[in-house]
Image (cartoon, helix red, strand yellow):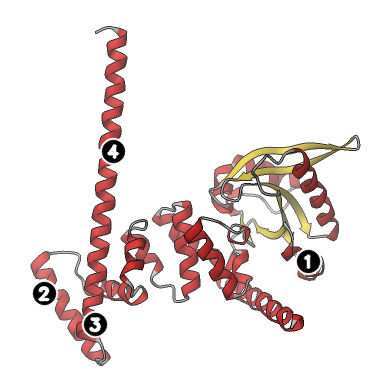
Amino acid sequence: MSKKEIQNSKTVLFELKTLIDESRQQVAVAVNSTMSMLYWNIGKRINTEILQNKRAEYGQQIVATLSDQLTKEYGKGWSEKNLRHMLKFADVFPKKEIVLSLIRQLSWTHILAIIPIEEPLKREFYIEMCKMERWSVRTFRERINSMLFERTAISKKPDETIKGDLEQLKNKEIISPDLIFHDPYFLDFLGLSDTYSEKDLESAILVELQHFITEIGSDFAFLARQKRITIDNEDYYIDLLFFHRKLRRLVAIELKLGHFKASHKGQMELYLRWLERYEKAEGENKPIGLILCALKNEEHIELLQLDNSNIKVAEYLTELPDMKVLEQKLHISIKRAKNRFMQKNLDER
C-alpha cells in the first residue's frame, strides 16, 4: 500500500471508531432514560395505587412483598432498598414532564444523589449546575458533600432571587455571577505547609491548575499569571487572570495571605477599570474581580457594599474543615444575609 492509501485507511478507521463510539453513547443515554422512566413509573404506581392513605406498617410489608416477587421474576435490581429509591423519585418529582426533561441529561445514579435533598431550591441548584458543567456522578456527589450550594453566593439571596436566577439559567441559559462564585474555596489540594507566601500560594495554584479550575468552576479559562498593566508609567500586576465562558467576562483574582482590608477594594477597582478599557473585547460583559483572603471581615464588606458590586470577596481554606462546624457557620451566614435583605426591603417601604 502507498503512503496515501495507508493514510486514507487510518482516516477511515478513525471515522468508523468515532461512529461506533457515538452510537454506543447514544444507546447508553437511551437505555438510561428508558430505565429511569421505568423506575419513576414504578414508584408512581406503588405510591398512588398501593400506598396512598395506607399506614406505614402496611407500606413496609407491601414493598417487601413486591421486592421478593420482582426479584424472583426478573433477578437483581429489585431489592426493597431500590424500590424505596423509586418511591422517593416519584415523590420528589411528581410531574411527568419534569421527569422527562430530567432523565435526558442526568443518569439514574445522578438522580439517586439528588433525591435525598429536601429543599426544592437547593435541589434545583444542583440539577441546573450539573447540567451546565456536565458533572460526572463522582463530581456531583463531591459538590453536594462539600456543601457547594451553601458556599455559593446565591444561597445568601432571597428565595425569589434564587428561583429567578435558576429559571434564567434553565430557560434562557443566562447565568448570574452569584451562581458561580463561592465562599469559602477549598484549596486543600495545594499541599501548603503552615507558613507560605503569596508567591507560594500563586505557584501552588498554577502547579495544580486543573484542581483549582475544578474547585472554582469548569468554565474558567486561565489567561495569565502576574498580568502586567501600566498606568501613568507605573506598573501593577494582577495575580491571576481568567476568562469565564458562560459569563463572558474577564475575571481578575487577587490572593491575600491575611484578612481583607478596605484598600484591597481600591486596588481591585483600579485593575477592573483598566481591564474594561484595554482588554475587554466587543460583546463581553464588564470584568469582575475575586479577592481571595485567609480571613474575611464581614462588616468591612457590608459597609463597602461589595455584595452589590462586581468585586467578590471570599475566604480560602488550605485544610479541609470539620464539615459540621462549617455547615453551622454557613447556615448562620446565610441566615444573617437573608435577614439583611429583609430589613433592607422593610426600610425601603
Q: Is residue 284 above or below residue 106?
A: above
Residue sitting nearer the eye, 17 or 260: 17
Do the numbered discs 2 and 3 sit on residues whose CB atoms are within 8 Å?
Answer: no
Task: Mark 2 vs mark 3: give the one in front.
Answer: 3
Q: Pointer 3: what residue?
A: 48
- At mark 1, the secondary structure is loop
Q: Nearer the viewer, residue 104 or 328?
A: 104
Mark 2 to mark 3: distance in Å?
A: 19 Å
- Marks 1 and 2 sit apart, C-alpha to C-alpha, by 62 Å
Type of amino acid under label 3: Thr
Q: Secondary structure at mark 4?
A: helix
Q: Give the spatial CA distance, label 2 vs label 4.
A: 37 Å
Q: Residues within 10 Å of mark 1 (few under 14, many from 20)?
A: few
Q: CA distance from mark 4 to mark 1?
A: 52 Å
Q: Nearer the viewer, mark 4 or mark 3?
A: 3
The residue labelled by disc 4 is: 21
Mark 3 or mark 2, which is nearer the start of the sequence?
A: 3
Helix, strand or loop under label 3: helix
Circle on res. 305: 1
**Residue at the disc numbered 2:** 69
What amino acid type should be assigned to the residue bearing mark 2? Gln
Q: Earlier in the sequence, mark 1 or mark 3?
A: 3
**Mark 4 or mark 3: whose residue is earlier in sequence:** 4
- In the image, which is nearer the foreground, mark 2 or mark 4? 4
- Please tell me how crowded label 4 is: few (under 14), some (14-19), or many (20+) other residues with Cα within 10 Å: few
Q: Residue at x 59, y 70 (%)?
A: 161
